[in-house]
Structures are given as structure tokens and as C-alpha cells.
Amino acid sequence: MKAFIGGQLITKLKPKEQSYDVWDSKLTGFILRVYPNGNMVYRCEYARGKRVTLGKTSVLTPM
């Protein structure tokens, strides 16, 4: 799924049975991962298949 990652999107996303990623439509490589337990984290893909977790949505906010 591709969408603009912001505060409104984070409040609308619901957890599913498996983790899923939402790719930012404006910033290449910026990802929001939603876990089945409802936790969400920001991630960054900096090379093909190489990703690093930046932090939880409860701690960080995208600008």
C-alpha cells in the first residue's frame, strides 16, 4: 500500500493478522510497519532489501 504517512493515516490504520507495510507516497524509502498487536514503527529502506527501524509512532512524529 502507498499513502502519505502522517498523523491522520496512523489513526486510521488497523492491525491485521500479519504485519504489513505502508510505503510513503512522497518520500522514497520511508515505510510504516503495522504489527498484529497494533504497534507501529517507522522504517527506512536505504539499499535494496536493507532496512533499519527508526522508532515507534508513539515516540516519533513525521514532519
Image (tube, rainbow, N blue to C red):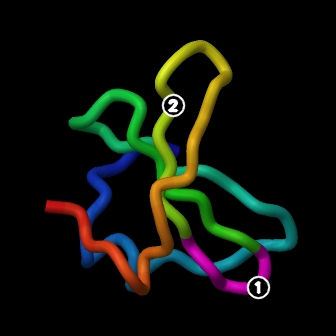
Vertical placement of residue 54 versus 13, above or below: above
Vertical placement of residue 58 versus 46, above or below: below
Quadrant (top left, top right, bottom left, bottom right) of the C terminus: bottom left
Vertical placement of residue 40 versus 4, above or below: below
Q: Residue at x 39, y 41 (%)?
A: 30
Amino acid marked by disc 2: Glu
Q: Residue at x 43, y 76 (%)?
A: 57
- What is the crowding at mark 2: few (fewer than 14 residues within 10 Å), some, or many (at least 20)? some
Q: Which quadrant of the structure image shows residue 52? A: top right
Q: Position of residue 10 (x, y in %)?
A: 39, 75
Q: Position of residue 56 (x, y in %)?
A: 49, 73
- What is the crowding at mark 1: few (fewer than 14 residues within 10 Å), some, or many (at least 20)? few
Q: Residue furthest top?
A: 48
Element assignment for label 2 = strand
Q: Residue at x 60, y 80 (%)?
A: 14
Instruction: Check residue 45 in the rendering and tell me which mark sits there, or answer none.
Output: 2
Report how far apart the C-alphas of labels 1 and 2 lie in the structure: 23 Å
Q: Which quadrant of the structure image shows residue 25? A: top left
> The magenta stretch spans which residues?
36-40
Q: Residue at x 23, y 63 (%)?
A: 62
Amino acid marked by disc 1: Asn
Q: Nearer the viewer, mark 1 or mark 2?
A: 2
Instruction: Check residue 37 in the rendering and tell me which mark sits there, or answer none.
Output: 1
Q: Could you say which is closer to the camera, residue 22 or residue 54?
A: 54
